[in-house]
Amino acid sequence: MSTQKKRPFQIEAFKHRVVVDPKYAEKTWKVLEHAIHEIYNHNASGLSFEELYRNAYNMVLHKFGEKLYSGLVTTMTSHLREISQSIESAQGEIFLEELNRKWVDHNKALQMIRDILMYMDRTFIPSNHKTPVHELGLNLWRDVVIHSSKTQARLLDTLLELVLRERNGEVINRGLMRNIIKMLMDLGLSVYQQDFEKHFLDVSANFYCLESQKFIESCDCGDYLKKAERRLNEEMERISHYLDPRTESKITNVVEKEMIESHMHTLVHMENSGLVNMLVDDKFEDLGRMYNLFRRVSSGLNIVKDVMTSFIRDTGKQLVMDPERLRDPVDFVQRLLDLKDKYDKIITMAFTNDKTFQNALNSSFEYFINLNARSPEFISLFVDDKLRKGLKGVGEEDVEIVLDKVMMLFRYLQEKDVFEKYYKQHLAKRLLSGKTISDDAERSLIVKLKTECGYQFTSKLEGMFTDMKTSHDTMQGFYMFHGGELADSPTLAVQVLTTGSWPTQPSPQCNLPTEILGVCEKFRAYYLGTHNGRRLSWQTSMGTADLKATFGKGQKHELNVSSYQMCVLMLFNNADRFTCKEIEQTTAIPMSDLKRCLQSLACVKGKNVLRKEPMSKDIAENDTFFFNDKFTSKFFKVKIGTVVAQRESEPENLETRQRVEEDRKPQIEAAIVRIMKSRRTLDHNNVVAEVTKQLQSRFLPNPVVIKKRIESLIEREFLERDKVDRKLYRYLA
């Protein structure tokens, strides 16, 4: 069986030539032209779009696309000229309505024409690089209608007039405005920008320039800012209703420049209503408005920040340098806290917690707090007052708030070691007298200080608490050891303080009364018997005592006094009268301390258990003192405080400063050695910079002092100078 080879099929071109009617193109175009006329005349309901589409299709198919396209341009142009004349003849407010109505009609007509000529749009136009039908219709509308000599300027003037009327408070047809603006945008972004936006921005700049000048002359700062804010909101609202969203940034820039940037210096410094006045009167709303408006312009917030910083620094400087304020350290610190609270609230509520303003506030406080060398002492005295009595009955959360505020001020201090010196003294007095309101509050503050400055800063403070606990256990052991043997002796409570942890200064020991001396010696024997190699020295200046006293008519009271006061009062068990000099010789109390004791015992109304001759507040060595039989009080327990200044006197302050300076020397030397050990060789300026950086968390070392400590280290052969460059130091291993 044989297989036949398959032959491929071929389709040949139709050889019969189709003869087209020579008048075909003209006839067909007449049909299409008539249809376009009918569409523009609103008579399209009787047209057969299927037949019209086929006619247009055939014209393109038979190579008459150019005739079809040029005929379309001519016909549409003719109709648009008629439309333009109709629009131009419209008078007054009807002008925009007529323009909008004709634009809507043109778009509808254009849609139907594009449907009829769809085949030409898809084939002929791309291949011949012609403009598509819809775009052609828009271009013709732009050129014939919008850019006609009688319409273009009139349209712009009408639109700008409506905007002006709206700015002046009149109600306009926003819907019509939106349609006209959208028409310009549909014609192309360049049409919208050149025919309207550019002129709109120029006119707006002139409007706001004149208006802002009028406002600045007639309004105070707060009212001006309200008007500027309202204008800004109006422009943004205008954008949302009928302008191109891309215009928003441009028009807001115009308002910002003319109403804010051009006048911000005047506004900030405006007399009786500017920024300073707002800060003083806590005008949070006005401050917030100024912040929100000024942040919109270049360097606006910098001006606000600089003026605020300058004012806070001046205010703070007046506060910390006012001699009247320095008389009461607690009030001094409270005013600082109130000032900080005030500006914290302003920054939170008006300046949205802006970090730039927070940093400016912090730098301002750091500046003026450190202008007063006694700020560390006063902050410690404030803490002392609060932890003694000021926070009694206050909840734990409120105590923490106060402590956090204290820590905030502490962070501003450049001489933190001075604060530490005073804080240690005040804490010691609170612990030894049992006057602290809460051990938890005390420990909480120490934890905060430890977090801020490290373990070394608080190690001695923690040691003080350890001593208090150990002393309590020691006293229990002492009384258990002696059993009932001490039943007839005075009750003794001893705190054994570790030398170095407590801020005790060497002080001469006074002569204790015989009754007290006996039990003290028993405690000494007990303690030294249980602890080998230790020494005890009595700090009589730091103790307190409770004395039972009987006055005239058998009236009895319990007197809470200091150890020095106890020594003085117990002298009157054996004699009726003593001079100041005799008391000093008998008790060996230093005269300065003795005078304060006698003042508190004889010169304080309601606490005068002694009488003095002659009567005066000052104590002289020859003044005579008597037991006051006539002393009365409505309280059984009477606390007699020592007359002592709340703050240190100038000589005492100077002495404390000298002790602080002495304590700094080894710290500076240690920092120098650490730096040189790691760097081996370093020049003088870099040594000073590195030492300052290391120690600034505790204090700012004086470059002169650093230089002296370097010289001392060179003398002791820790460092040496380079033989060529005398300002270059080398570490000696």
Image (cartoon, rainbow, N blue to C red):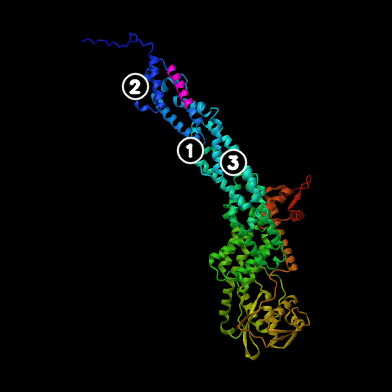
Q: Nearer the viewer, residue 679 or 110?
A: 110
Labelled disc at residue 46: none
Q: Nearer the viewer, mark 1 or mark 2?
A: 1
User: Within 10 Å of the Cα at label 3, are there few (<14), some (14-19), or many (20+) other Cα atoms?
Assistant: some
C-alpha span from label 1 to label 2: 38 Å
Labelled disc at residue 51: 2
Q: Amino acid at mark 1?
A: Leu
- The residue sitting at the left extreme is 1
In the displayed structure, would residue 191 be above or below residue 299?
Answer: above
Q: Which residues are magenta?
A: 66-82
The percent position of residue 127, horizontal first and vertical second, equals 45, 19
Q: Are marks 3 and 1 in contact (CB under 8 Å)?
A: no
The percent position of residue 59, horizontal first and vertical second, equals 39, 17
In the displayed structure, would residue 195 be above or below residue 427?
Answer: above
State which tag comes first along the sequence, 3 or 1.
1
Question: Of helix, strand and loop, which mostly describes the magenta segment?
Answer: helix
Asked whether residue 352 is in view, the answer is: yes
Dividing the picture into quadrants, the one containing residue 446 is: bottom right
The percent position of residue 383, horizontal first and vertical second, equals 62, 66
| Residue at numbered disc 3 | 253
Q: Nearer the viewer, residue 87 or 504?
A: 87
Residue 73 is one of the magenta-drawn residues: yes
Quadrant position of the N terminus in the picture: top left
Residue 625 is one of the magenta-drawn residues: no
Q: Residue at x 59, y 53 (%)?
A: 286
Check disc 1 and report its element: helix, strand or loop.
Answer: helix
| Residue at numbered disc 1 | 176
